Image (cartoon, rainbow, N blue to C red):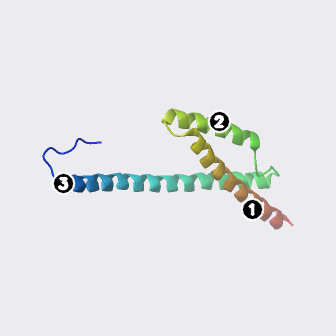
């Protein structure tokens, strides 16, 4: 945080605060855009995984891998200064959605084979 402006009145402080707020929000907006693009890329890959699983009769979920991923993500979160509980909840949310997609892909592949 920057030092207060010397001799500035309340209006000047408020204007500076608004400038800083806009800068921070621009950064947040850029990060949100990056997150959306990263999630889209992740889901493109998990769709391919789901298709491979369905074509080869593998189950949509892999609980052992999921637990390894949770532990890996919790460790990375801790090192990055992010709450590991939040990181785990976020990953579990994503994995739940991925499994749902894999189940739908399996149904589609099974239907196509019938």
Q: Earlier in the sequence, mark 3 or mark 1?
A: 3
In which quadrant will I find the N terminus? top left
Residue on which the image places disc 1: 104
> In the image, is residue 69 above or below residue 47?
above
**Are the residues at dot 3 and dot 1 in contact (C-beta closer than 8 Å)?**
no
In-front residue for pair 79/83: 83
C-alpha span from label 2 to label 1: 27 Å
| Mark 3, secondary structure of its residue | helix
| Mark 1, secondary structure of its residue | helix
Is 113 left or right of 77, judged from the image as shown? right
Which residue is at 63% across, 52% downward? Answer: 45
Question: Which mark's residue is nearer the viewer, 3 or 1?
Answer: 3
Residue 96 in picture, x, y percent from top left: 69, 53
Which residue is at 70% across, 59% downward? Answer: 101
Residue on which the image places disc 3: 12
C-alpha span from label 2 to label 3: 48 Å
- Determine the image quadrant of residue 15: bottom left
The disc at residue 71 is 2
Q: Earlier in the sequence, mark 2 or mark 1?
A: 2
């Amino acid at each position: 945080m920057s030092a207060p402006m010397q001799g500035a009145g309340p209006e000047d402080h408020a204007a500076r605060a608004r400038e800083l707020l806009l800068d921070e929000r621009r950064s947040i907006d850029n990060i949100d855009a990056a997150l959306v693009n990263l999630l889209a890329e992740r889901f493109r890959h998990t769709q391919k995984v789901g298709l491979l699983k369905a074509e080869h009769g593998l189950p949509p979920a892999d609980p052992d891998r999921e637990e390894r991923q949770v532990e890996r993500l919790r460790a990375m979160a801790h090192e990055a200064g992010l709450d590991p509980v939040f990181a785990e909840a976020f990953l579990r949310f994503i994995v739940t959605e991925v499994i749902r997609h894999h189940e739908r892909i399996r149904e589609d592949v099974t239907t196509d084979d019938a």
